[in-house]
Image: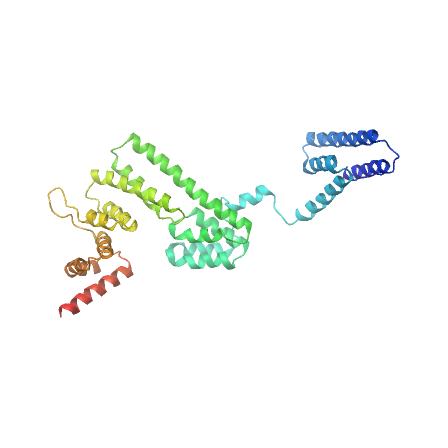
Amino acid sequence: MVAITGFLEIVLARQFFNGEMRPAYAISGHFVILAAIALHTLSRMKKGKDLRLSFLLFSFTFALGPAGAAATLLTAAMVSIFSRKTKPFEEWYCTLFPDEASSQSDILEEIQAQRAQGERSIMPLIDVLTFGTHTQKQALLTMVTSNFKPAFAPVLKTALNDANNAIRVQAATGITKIEADFMTRAVDLTNRCEQNPDDADLLKEIAEHYDRYAYIGLLEHDRETECRNNALGYYARYLALRPDDSAARTAAGRILVRDRRYKDAVAWFERVGSDGTVVPRAPEEAVWYLESLFRLGHFAKVRAILMASGKELQDSAGLPLEILEAVQLWVDGNAEGNA
């Protein structure tokens, strides 16, 4: 159809410019050709065939005459060449986040084996984005999005600047998916809290949800602040019902410290119980309390607390090695000063 259209348009144009055909006849012939293309397109539509080139032929011929047929022919040739190397859009889009990761790449198994290593595995993951193949990068982003945790945020941010457009799209889609999952969960928990305002377990669940999301490393400052404030509000409501939960108390105080509200954090950690006595602090809570005092420059108080309970902190299970080393330095320094 393209060749016939081009031939007829060339004949009309040649006769018109040579003065062998009047303008009215040339224009009429042009519209007859367009009508024939339209009928051909309708017949292909009824047969369920691809109509993209037919629409292009009609549009180009209408606007450009003989050149339109040539442009359509060139487009058809390019489509034929590039279609051998490319995937259909639907197939390409499905590969961004497949239901099951492909097993053809051994790198995915290595990535999943490193997943439990936390932040220590981030540099190898970023190396995959820097030096890996396209398939390896897609497998990595699929795993990171499906099993997201805050330590993976640098991977997604790095992928947003990848030279490959498909990788950038997959990273952006992954971030959008993470945010959408959070919002869906937050809305559901909020609705349930409104229906059961005194459900302590539900209050703790939504507080922890906002707490985790505030530090995923993908949010803007204002959004982080909003999530931290929501988490603090729900922790306060929860602790009003269950004041003996040291983990929740620690989490609320940690938010204040990370938000650089050190005076508020000190006041929070130095609160007293209903009987007028100081509420005992769990090891992790004591660490955040000491951090607040240190940031405020209350070094004498830090020294006094560590002299009294530094050994207990050192014997506590679950504290990071960096914290234990810092406590050891303070304890040893105090011991040398008193010697």
- x 46%, y 45%: residue: 174
Say above or below: 12 vs 263. Answer: above
Say above or below: 278 vs 34. Answer: below
Image side of residue 68 versus residue 220, left or right: right
Number of numbered labels in the structure image: 0
Quadrant (top left, top right, bottom left, bottom right) of the N terminus? top right
Say above or below: 65 vs 96. Answer: above
Residue 151 visible in this rendered orientation of the protein = yes
- x 79%, y 29%: residue: 32
Q: Position of residue 88 (x, y in %)?
A: 61, 43
Image side of residue 22 versus residue 140, left or right: right
Image side of residue 189 versus residue 102, left or right: left
- The front one of 89 and 48 is 89
Q: Position of residue 308 (x, y in %)?
A: 14, 59
- The front one of 155 and 293 is 293
Quadrant (top left, top right, bottom left, bottom right) of the C terminus? bottom left
Q: Residue 234 lies in what quarter of the image?
A: top left
- x 17%, y 69%: residue: 336
- The front one of 172 and 220 is 220
Q: Position of residue 114 (x, y in %)?
A: 41, 57
Q: Residue 57 lies in what quarter of the image?
A: top right
Give the residue at the far right of this rendering.
Answer: 20
Residue 104 visible in this rendered orientation of the protein = no
Image side of residue 47 versus residue 171, left or right: right
Q: Position of residue 110 (x, y in %)?
A: 45, 57
